[in-house]
Image: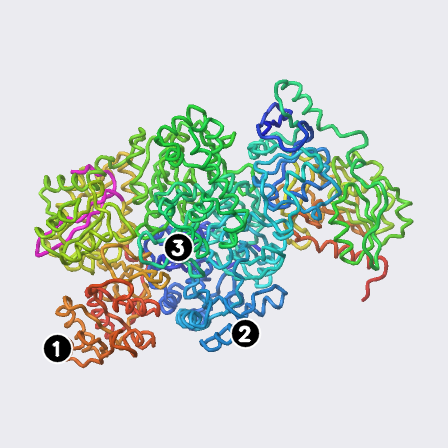
Amino acid sequence: MPLMEGLRKVMVIGSGPIVIGQAAEFDYAGTQACRALKEENIEVVLVNSNPATIMTDAHIADRVYIEPLVPEVVASILRRERPDGIIATLGGQVGLNMAVALDRIGVLKETGIPLLGTSLEAIKRAEDREMFKMTMQDIGEPIPESTIVDNVDDALEFARRIGYPVIVRPAYTLGGTGGGTAYSDEELYDTVTRGLKMSIIKQVLIEQSVLGFKEIEFEVMRDANDNCITICSMENVDAMGIHTGDSIVVAPALTLNDEEYQMLRSAALKIISKLQIAGGCNIQFALNPFSKEYYVIEVNPRVSRSSALASKATGYPIARVTTKIAIGYNLDEIVNRITGKTSACFEPAIDYVVVKIPRWPFDKFGSGDRRLGTQMKATGEVMAIDRTFEAALLKGIRSLEQGVYGLHLPELVELDENELKHRLANADDERIFVIGEALRRGVPVDEIWELTRIDKFFLRKIRNIVAMADKIKAGEPDRELLYQAKRMGFADCELATMVGCSEKHIRALRKQWGITPTYKLVDTCAAEFEAETPYYYSCYESEDEARQTTQERKILVIGAGPIRIGQGVEFDYCSVHCVWALREAGIKAIIVNNNPETVSTDFDTSDRLYFEPLVFEDVMNIIEEEKPEGVIVQFGGQTAINLAQSLQEAGVKILGTSFDDIDRAENRDRFDELVEALAIPRPPGGSVTSIEAGLEVAARIGYPVLVRPSYVLGGRAMEIVYNENEMVEYMRGAVKVSREFPVLVDKYLQGKELEVDAVSDGQDVLIPGIMQHIERAGVHSGDSVAVYPAHQISETIKDKIIDYTVKLARALSVKGLINIQFVEYNGELYVLEVNPRSSRTVPYISKVTGIPMVKLATEIILGKTLREMGCHSGLYPSPGYYAIKVPVFSFAKLVQVDVILGPEMKSTGEVMGVDACFEKALYKGFTAAGIAIPDSGVIVATIADKDKEEAIPILRGFYDLGFKLVATSGTARALEKAGMKVQRVNKLHEGSPHIVDLIREDKVDFVVNTLTKGRGPYSDGFQIRRAAVELGIACLTSLDTTRVILEVIKDLKKGREFTPVALQEYLV
Amino acid sequence: MRKGYLVLENGAIFEGVLVGQETFTSGEVVFNTSMVGYEQVASDPSYAGQIVVMTYPLIGNYGVNLNSMESGGLSLRGLVVRELCPDPEHHDSQMKMEEFLNRYNLVALVGVDTRAITRVLRTRGTMGGVITESITRKDELVEMARLAVQPPPGGYVLQVTCREITSQGTGPRRVVLLDFGAKRSIATSLAQRGCEVITVPADTDAQRIMEFNPDGVVLSNGPGDPRDCPYAVETIGHLVGRVPIMGICLGHQLLALALGGVTYKLAFGHRGANQPVKDLQTGRIYVTSQNHGYAVEESSLPGSEAYVSFKNMNDGTVEGLKHRYLPLMSVQFHPEASPGPQDTRYLFDEFIAVMDKESGRACG
């Protein structure tokens, strides 16, 4: 069937903020969807609360609603826009749940707007455990024995009958939230309680364990004519038991023979056909490694993280094709854009190996439980392509940017044999390295298999890498050995370490011997047809397909790599906009990146895409292949900035702000010189190389101080230290202090944090806006609620901000973007940090001001001035509305991570609330972030002594609004003294029922907890905070946040209604 | 480690490592894009006379189980792969790929940039080639490569067809399988569906076939140019109209020739497990397993009463034939799969239904 008749306007539902289990893949999917619709001249209405995405750009959709993804809001947008249909299958689980909710609240019926693509019935058949079970039984597809329970007792009874271990999966959650494997009654009790809380329909599935089975996935596609195809098979290197989002995954499946492959493929097609999915779908199987026994584990009736991976792994644009199917096309009516000739109705054949490796946040969360299980913990992932598994794996490892370039992790050498085996048996984020270490010590593959259940095929491949390393270490390699090592994926720097020479030496040797990489095309068809995709990966083969003799201008843009805490989708946003600006300027834009979830790695974003690690060697190879006139590093976050020095030293031209100026902003001593010369105040402090010196500096500037190591151990990085004891503890315990690794000690100014993003051509500086952070300095800017335009700022301070920004941008000769963080303290403005590059807030500010910051910056990099582009220096006038950015955390998924806000960033994503009224904008922001704002209810407060004075008036505000206050003894006393009625609750050591019990009973609406000493995992505060997070109760650790929530609630008394407004209306 | 080379008739040389006892082979060089099923590919008699380049770089991962073989031996001339797994892992595996190759005396060239070869073949069309351990006399090798595409007198089919008549399976229907180099899965697929399958040599004549009193005749796949089998075209000509016929791959081409159609050589053929074909009656698309270098010319059919039932989605070539009045059906692809997708196995059921109808066995 061709395009459905009467389809003029379609709503696309986005996936909201980035959280663990739902990352940038839905920006890629949503963006493809919007573009696929616009191609058909369909007006696109987009709703998504995440401002850091490409899809929420005003030119991607015709009407962009950056509004909370809650049913009532989406319903009112539906009533306002009256689209002809809704596409919900590209917005992840959020989108799917929204479709179900819109039906539940009756708005679909009321408006008569149909769901396009997969129907609601089909979604329910796949998502509702009982219906799914019946459907599978119907078509004779085996599923593990299971039962659905809505209470703990039934779960226990079932588990005792079928035996432990059992798997617990809450219905309708993402990334397996709240799930887990239970080995005993106690564990089952805990997991089920948590799972019930997490499931929106209050159901969990208890399932027979298939631990140790192979985990195989198929990406399948179906159209209304029942044409079914598989896009890609994928195999988890880790056996069943570890969430696929936390597994190393290969594509295609590597250990199945034809019989098994076809058995599962046929089953997948049978399932998608029976479920009547229209579009992309992901099906997971567990396959017994010793027989043909298999089970269907899960069906995702939508585009998923695996779809993004499958898309990038094969070149097949799953989201685009899913969209076309949703609007009526059949697969054979959709053109395969790769070949430009054939149709989308085919199965990709690939001629390489793809390896995906998850990127975990434990570098930030040292105290987090690093064990891997059914609960996903990774924030992002990298993908690598090569002609062998070994090479793709090694490329993937260096793409992680964790300072590791091979299988060797030095700290594992110290493990004794028992520890090593324990870690093999209990998977954690370092498992691949633990396996490497075990193989190095000669632990037999069979034994490692016993402990890990990782297929011996993979273990032997890993052993090949270890064996090659041994050969290289045996002496200076000859040409043949070096060639073999490079073919196996060894990095130059890893080889250098093993041989005992410099990376430069290896590179020179390689060139002398003619060992240089070749580039191959990702073309969906294993070279059977000529392809038009400019999508390349490197390998050491005989033919180079990327070689060309073009005289056109070319520029290389360095991407941002995997999504991690501190470096999210916003840098992909910037990279993509830079590429687009280059292309508009008539320059061939080449991008290098390794994140399969992103828009930047879509083959039609740039003129050429290189899917490669973002380390010097691989980037330099591309530069030598392409010979671009220069490289742009300022949009790819710290990843790209970190490459600037080595590239410059290799003679590569860094376009835009020079490396020397970047260094002047980043190097502590040089930065001090700079601000001193400009007479810009900064908090006093110094860098120290001993405990004594640290104490001395702190005493001189006065506590509290902000301490920051230049070398991080065990994840503890920046901290605020309040006294001498804490100082000693910090310096001794957490950091390595030495001449080589100084510790920075700065006066902690507990003031108002202000931030600007600006565009500079070196002379003129355009400041689109000033943001004010709700939380005072000391909370990482990425974790703060940011208000644009700054709502409490004097003209004097505003002028100073403009003045300092212009001075700094000029002094650093910034060509492009600059981000500056200030603190206002006792009426004085201090500069905290200068980043001469794009920042996290650039997409947000670009969107709400309508100033295309990245485009302007790119034009400047190409030589234009702001004036030539009609821009003026100074602060851009602020609009008549507030745009408030609210951070979103994934704490529920990270057991044992403290949720307290501090100088280290912890959030994984963000949302935005926009409204003419400040409180309404906040309300939208909090709602979008999933923080329920009740009119009345119960607040549990435990306030540190140092904060009591400040906290009392805030709590009184809640009290006066009718909130019931519950507090532990100290706080209760203070509240009572201030004349409030308080219900007392026991501290933990005072015995049950205590404060954590109260929270667990789910009778609390907010927890307000400020930090006391003793932040270990056994402190009361920690347990209170964790209990709140795990039960989805808002836990406020900053009084500033608490105060604005109070303001919002006061405002809500006037009414909760607000009108959703499209970005395009604001920007008029 | 012995170095080895693939030399193509256009003079292109690709370096690799030789595996197997032999050090020289020659044949028509073709590529196959299947990602699994290398042992079925290797044992498919349709590859007789060919050197097969596997585009998937990792071959041998799950070892070899001889029960998966599609014939009693390896008919291909050589194998070219990027990586031959030295230590496979699978509960069904009986030996590793290298042992398998040695068992059947096949030479393989390993460690080669197979994608580069594929690109040459895609651009220039299939070519002759030799695998050799020395390239000192290049001109001679190129000449040998050029000659390597010449079929033996009488064609490849007579080399790979069975020598004796055998029977397999039991059931209410009797099917004669005319073996032009049949894959075992064809007989198995029929036997599983309640057929007694009598496999006869390619040069069996129509009278002998009809003596079996079959409910249907299946024309198998096989190697080479269909025009090398005039005897079979004649036989089929005598069978048409007397018995339901199902043709597969070469069998399809031979049926077309018997109906007065014309076949031609494709530039580089279809070899892989991802070929989409469209059922022109229903509009449904199926992903199929294919292995052929020749095709039926669509324009040669009008005038006859045969019509095109399936078409290839990639290049529009004829993928299946049916007849307006007679119980004839043939497909260019492999409904028996092995290796490859099983989407079109239903065609065997269709053929059985046709046989049953013709013999009056069908009820209602």
Q: Quadrant of residue B52?
A: top right
Q: Secondary structure at mark 1?
A: loop
Q: Earlier in the sequence, mark 3 or mark 1?
A: 3
Q: Quadrant of the N terminus of chain A?
A: bottom right
The first of marks 2 and 3 along the sequence is: 2
Is B297 rendered above or below residue A650? below
Residue A161 marker: 2
The answer to whether tags 2 and 3 share a subunit is yes
- In the depicted view, which residue is nearer to us: A84 or A839? A839
Q: Is residue A939 visible?
A: no
Secondary structure found at label 3: loop
Task: Please give the residue where the numbered disc 1 appears in the rendered image.
Answer: A978
Quarter of the image for residue A1057 reads bottom left
Respond whether the residues carrying marks 3 and 1 are from the same subunit.
yes
The span picked out in magenta is: A811-837
Q: CA distance from mark 2 to mark 3?
A: 34 Å
Q: Position of residue A62 (x, y in %)?
A: 38, 54
Check disc 3 and report the residue beneath it: A378
Amino acid type of the residue that numbered disc 2 sits on in the rendered structure: Arg
Asked where in the image residue A131 lies, by quadrant, the reply is: bottom right
